[in-house]
Each structure stands twice: as C-alpha cells, then as structure tokens.
C-alpha cells in the first residue's frame, strides 16, 4: 500500500461502524490491506456494506483480544471513548494509533491536499468539486461526509492520484486527540465556507469555536491558497490577508435567475446554465467550488459543463418526490444557520406555494437549553413550522428535560408546532391540505423511523 505508511498492511478500526469509518475500512480492504474492526452498534447501511466485504464483526462490542502485537496500526473513530477496552489495549502494547484525519494525512503526504472547511456547506462544496473532477476524468483521491451519486465509497486512497479533496470537519479528531480534524490535514488549498457556532459540548463559546477557524486559516502554507466567503462576517474575522506568501480569494453567491421554480446560473458571457440545486447557500457553494476547481486547472466553461449534471449530495436538499402542485424534499439541516438557509431558500424557490417545514432536534447542541436561543427567528420562512424531538435522546445524551414551551420560546415563533411523539407528528402532517403546498423535512436523524416515502406519496398525490 504505497499511498499509506509503508508497513501498514494489517489494520484494526475501533468504531468501524461509523459513517466515515466503515467507508475507510472498505477503501483499505479494496487496496488489499487486512482489515478488522469493532463497534458496539452498527446500523444500516454500514452493516450490510461491511458484511458484503467480509468485514462485519462477528459480534457487536469491544474485544481487547482483537488487539494483538502483530497489528501494524489501530485507527480509532471519534465515537469511541477514551476508556475503550481495545484502545487501552493498543496503548498498552505500544501500537501506532491514528485518528481518522491523522491516517488520511499519512496516506496523502505526497499529494496536493485541498481541505474544505466551514460550519455549513462543506459537504456540498466537496461534492461539487468531486463531481467536476470526475466528469473531466481527472485523477483524485477524496474523503467526504456524504454518499454521492456515482461514487460507491466516501473515501478513496490510491497510489497515483496527485490530489486529494477532503471535507474538513471542525469536530475533534478522536477521544485521545482533542484537536479539530481539519487542523491535521495540513492543506495546500484551504476553504472556509461560513462560520456559525456549533458543537457547544466541545466549544463552549462562540469565540472558542471561531478560534478553530482562525488557526486553520493561519495554517495555510507559503504559496498556499485560502478561499473564503467574503460576505460572512465571522469568516472575515479570521481570514484577514496577513500573510504575503498566501493567495486569498473571496467569493459570494453566483449570479443567477429563477424561472418557474428552476434556477439557472448566469455566466460572464450572459449565458444561462440550468442547474438542479437552488438557494442562496448553494449559489455560494457553487462559487466556492468554482474557485477551487480553477486552482486545479479547470476552466470556467468546463466547470459549467460538468455542473449541469450535478444533482447534489445525499440529504442536502434532496428531492424525495414531485407531484403536479407539490414537492417533498429532505435535508441534513440541523444547526441554526443551516436551518435558516435551507428553509429560506425553499420558500424563495416556490413563493406561491404554502411551505410546511419540519425540523428534528437531534444533536447535542440542538437539544442543549444553553444553545437553543441560537435558533431565534431561524425558522420564520415556512408557513407552517414544526419541531420534533424524542425525549429519550435527551436521556441518552444526559441532557435535562426540554419542555415544548421552552423550544417554542427559543425559536421566538408563537405558532411553532412542537411534537415529542413521531406518531403524533405523522398524524399532524397527514391532516394538512397539500394542494399547492410543499413539504421540507430536515434532520440529521430519522424522525424516529417516520416513513418519509409513504408520506411523500400522499403529499404529491
């Protein structure tokens, strides 16, 4: 495996069932490495994908006896704990232990590294870049946080690709490495799409959170490039052009026109390029991706040619079903800035239709009473706004009980509907009048198993 540290052919992954970790396991297996792994919970689609490759652990749980002296290295995922029995065993044996970002860096030391950071938009921007590079048959490696159409894995590591495109998450690298992931990739080309306080359990203040992006910006090397959203006030605070050896490139939303619910870009030659995504945030993402692709030698006309076939990343304003007078979309939005951008974009795209939008509070930050005020007026765009959360998730995350009235007060929307039972939510949606109305479902979870396809069929009848 020349693209990874020379001797790393036998690897064990702790927390192998994670979204990105199971993709890493599959990518390494495809390279010919001997891969084993463990996890205390493995859900679909990771379970089936690992099983198909012969990598699914025989039993769920942690088994220190799997950690043996003949392993070349152990890769530990963020969802493992610092007292994980397998991790403790690896430490006792003095084995090489990598976090996911450390391993990706080791695997790409000899490549040009492009790292896409930001509180929002980084998955979509990364996806756009990968789509354009693949369309033009460029060789590249990648690590991205969503399943993309036309890509069977979310991670690729090869011998001959000269560049790697990495989605740079600001969350912590591992339970024993408290540095943000995107600090470890050592980018040549870096991008910051926007900064909006998140991960309150790790970064207790807005200043703490913003500082991580300032550090990232400052890591841009001599002759490196830093691309940033020039209209984001928080980004402006950390991307002040202070290094004469760095090229700083600002961007804003791409010029465009909306006709009959469809968006088209307007090029410098006043040509219209129809696209399959919409919203101000996606127009910013497109400008960001275009700047990165330009740095990688992709000309404007070639970028637009490829962009016309881009359908978006999974669960990022993803069309579920379309009817004659209604559409149903789902989106990964959960943080305040993502919620506001997505809901506002959807309403602007279909201004004459009633919008029913549902948000599931699912992450630690979104369920934390200290963070909830950040949602004030972020959900004003929909005609009907609904928030759902499961009280059992609060218990699992060891958070205090959350009265529905407190949620309504935090959003500062008196007509906000708040549900704590998924069946009651489903009944409420079934009772809505869906003539000339759209439905937008936003969550990083599943609304506790709500059948969205069945609901979408009813809405678009």
Image (spheres, helix red, strand yellow):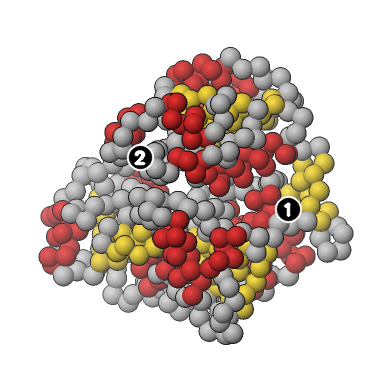
On the image, the x and y values in percent for residue 337 come to 55, 47
Observer-nearest of 126 and 1: 126
Q: Classify residue 112 as left or right of residue 293.
A: left
Q: Is 243 rendered above or below residue 259?
A: below
Looking at the picture, how far across and down is residue 333, in whole percent? 53, 42
**Rounded to the nearest whole Å, what is the CA distance between mark 2 and mark 1?**
34 Å
Disc 1 element: loop
Front residue of 221 and 13: 221
Q: Quadrant of the N terminus?
A: bottom left
Name which residue lies at 57% across and 17% down. Answer: 430
Residue at image position (86%, 63%) is: 269
Q: Position of residue 52 (x, y in %)?
A: 37, 46
Answer with mark 2 or mark 1, whichever residue precedes in sequence.
Answer: 2
Position of residue 421 in the picture relative to residue 90 (left or right)? right
Q: Is residue 13 visible?
A: no
Residue 29 position by quadrant: bottom left
Name above or below for residue 178 compared with residue 381.
Answer: below
User: Compared with residue 450, is residue 172 higher up or lower down, i.e. above or below?
Assistant: below
Graded by Cα atoms within 10 Å as few (under 14), some (14 to 19) or many (20 or more), the crowding at tag 1 reads some
- Residue nearest the viewer, comparing 125 with 367: 367
Which quarter of the image is occupied by the C terminus? top right
Which residue bears the numbered disc 1? 308
How would you rate the neighbour count of disc 2 (Cα within 10 Å): few for under 14, some for 14-19, many for 20 or more?
few
Secondary structure under the numbered disc 2 in the rendered image = loop
Q: Which residue is mark 2?
A: 43
What residue is rendered at 33% in x and 75% in y? 5
């Amino acid at each position: 495996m020349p693209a990874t540290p020379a001797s790393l052919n036998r690897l064990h992954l702790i927390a192998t069932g994670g979204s990105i970790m199971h993709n890493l396991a599959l990518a390494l297996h495809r390279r010919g490495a001997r891969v084993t792994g463990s996890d205390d919970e493995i859900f679909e689609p990771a379970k089936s994908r690992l099983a198909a490759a012969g990598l699914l652990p025989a039993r769920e749980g942690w088994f220190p006896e799997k950690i043996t002296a003949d392993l070349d290295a152990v890769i530990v995922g963020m969802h493992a704990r610092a007292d994980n029995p397998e991790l403790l065993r690896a430490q006792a044996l003095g084995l090489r232990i990598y976090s996911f970002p450390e391993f990706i860096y080791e695997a790409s030391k000899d490549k040009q590294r492009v790292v896409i950071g930001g509180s929002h938009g980084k998955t979509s921007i990364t996806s756009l870049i990968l789509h354009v590079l693949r369309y033009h048959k460029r060789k590249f490696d990648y690590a991205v946080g969503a399943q993309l159409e036309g890509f069977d894995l979310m991670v690729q590591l090869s011998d001959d690709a000269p560049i790697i495109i990495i989605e740079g998450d600001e969350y912590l690298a591992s339970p024993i490495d408290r540095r943000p992931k995107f600090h470890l990739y050592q980018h040549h080309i870096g991008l910051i799409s926007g900064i909006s306080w998140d991960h309150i359990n790790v970064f207790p203040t807005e200043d703490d959170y913003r500082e991580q992006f300032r550090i990232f910006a400052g890591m841009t090397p001599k002759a490196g490039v830093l691309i940033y959203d020039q209209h984001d006030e928080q980004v402006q605070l950390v991307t002040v052009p202070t290094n004469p050896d760095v090229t700083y490139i600002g961007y804003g939303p791409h010029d465009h026109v909306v006709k009959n619910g469809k968006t088209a870009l307007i090029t410098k030659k006043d040509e219209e390029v129809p696209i399959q995504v919409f919203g101000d945030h996606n127009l910013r993402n497109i400008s960001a991706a275009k700047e990165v692709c330009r740095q990688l030698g992709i000309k404007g006309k070639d970028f637009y040619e490829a962009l016309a076939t881009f359908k978006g990343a999974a669960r990022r304003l993803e069309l579920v079903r379309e009817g004659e007078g209604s559409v149903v979309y789902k989106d990964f939005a959960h943080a305040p800035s993502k919620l506001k951008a997505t809901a506002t974009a959807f309403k602007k795209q279909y201004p004459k239709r009633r919008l029913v939008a549902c948000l599931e509070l699912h992450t630690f930050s979104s369920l934390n009473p200290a963070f909830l005020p950040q949602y004030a007026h972020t959900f004003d765009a929909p005609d009907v706004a609904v928030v759902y959360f499961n009280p059992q998730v609060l218990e699992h995350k060891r958070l205090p009980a959350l009265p529905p009235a407190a949620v309504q007060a935090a959003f500062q929307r008196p007509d906000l509907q708040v549900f704590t039972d998924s069946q009651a939510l489903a009944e409420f949606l079934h009772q809505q009048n869906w003539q000339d109305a759209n439905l937008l479902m936003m969550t990083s979870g599943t609304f506790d198993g709500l059948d969205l396809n069945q609901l979408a069929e009813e809405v678009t009848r």
